[in-house]
Amino acid sequence: MKVHLEDLRTLSQDILEESGLVEGDAHIVTDILLEAELRGRSTHGLIRLPGIADRLARGGRSAMMLAKDGGAYALVDGQENLGYLVAHRCARMVVGKADRVGLGVVGAFHTNHCGMLGYYASMIADAGMVGLVMCDTYPRIVPWGGTEAVLGTNPIAAGFPAPGGQILVDMSAAAITNGQILMAIKDGVDIPEGVALGPDGKLTTDPEVARKGSALPFGGHKGYALGVMVQILSGIMMQGAPVPEVGKDYGIFMLAIEPTIFIDKQAFQGGIQEFVDRIKGADKAEGVEEILIPGERAFREREVRLREGIEVEEGLLEELKRLS
């Protein structure tokens, strides 16, 4: 059923505040979850809320700390706070660094799942900067040629300010994400062939079996290599665990660049527009009506859902109402 955005915002806010978050922090987490819903990324949306509430109910919180701080860089000790809050703080800090000196690099450790990475890349792009965001997670992905999970799903996102909006790359190194598996379980459907292994190391299309097993990297050895890169940059280099435990000591890496340290703002925007125009005007394959720019589908979906409401599975909605 479709639900108005503000009704879902109130529901999520109530659940998070009742779970122990102060109003401002509850607002941050709610906004990240709802932005995922608006962009059609329900795997990172409200389906995550019961788990967040459960995590908050199981333990107290300590204040985040600055482990390192320099002119263009900082490292945050997340103190096992919600990854959403840690990543949001990192995004604000990296924009501030880049605003002052033209370039910012901010990382974090001692944190956990932070949701849709594209949210934070968009924060940086909204500030007129180029943003690159990565994080690692607990082992879910097998190395290429292996059957035992060692790498996380290790998402990566990049945001670029563009005329009239932004170009947004948001992807995982996994052939299938945990959220997609959870959605398949909830919907009672199979997952695609060739994306996941069961605990026995054999391919499976059963999401329940896949949840107990592992996933393959997307694109074979290329996705595997990308996952290794992300885990080194966001995990090891940022003092996170080389191979994190479930929900514990994940790492975050963020880079923000003010384009004007290299190129005039008008020239940069003009170059982006020329590039986009060339892509959109390229010869199309048979049956293709339009070539889309990365992020374009998500932002179009956002406009539709702002007007018409967000589709929420009835069982999930009832579960959220019980939590509140």
Image (spheres, rainbow, N blue to C red):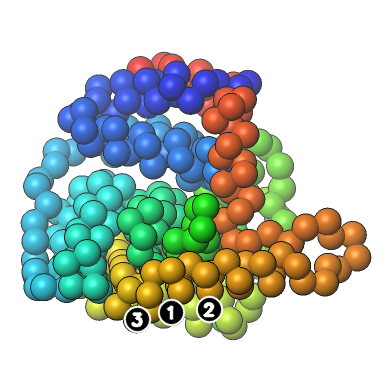
Residue 168, percent from left and from top: 51, 60
Sequence-wise, which precedes: disc 3 or disc 1?
Answer: 1
Amino acid of disc 3: Phe
- Foreground: disc 3 or disc 1: 3
**Which quadrant holds residue 42?**
top right
Residue 2 point in image, percent of width and height = 61, 22
Would residue 253 be found to the left or right of residue 99 on screen? right
| Residues tagged 1 and 2 counted as in contact (Cβ below 8 A) | yes
Residue 151 locus on image (x, y percent) = 44, 71
- Secondary element type, mark 2: helix
User: How many residues crowd mark 2 within 10 Å: few (<14), some (14–19), many (20+)?
Assistant: many
Q: Which residue is mark 1?
A: 228
Q: Amino acid at mark 2?
A: Tyr
> Quarter of the image containing the C terminus?
top left
Which residue position holds label 2? 224
Mark 2 or mark 3: which is in front? Answer: 3
- Label annotation for residue 163: none
User: In the picture, which quadrant includes the N terminus?
Assistant: top right
Q: Which corner quadrant of the image does residue 11 belong to?
A: top left
Residue topped by disc 3 = 262
Disc 2 from disc 3: Cα separation: 32 Å
> Along the line of sight, which residue is nearer the eye, 141 or 163?
163
Label 3 crowd bin: few (<14), some (14–19), many (20+), radius 10 Å: few
Give the residue at x 31% y 21%: 14
Residue 257: image location, x then y, percent: 32, 71
Is residue 194 in view? no
Viewer-side residue, 55 vs 201: 55
Total numbered badges shown on the rendered structure? 3
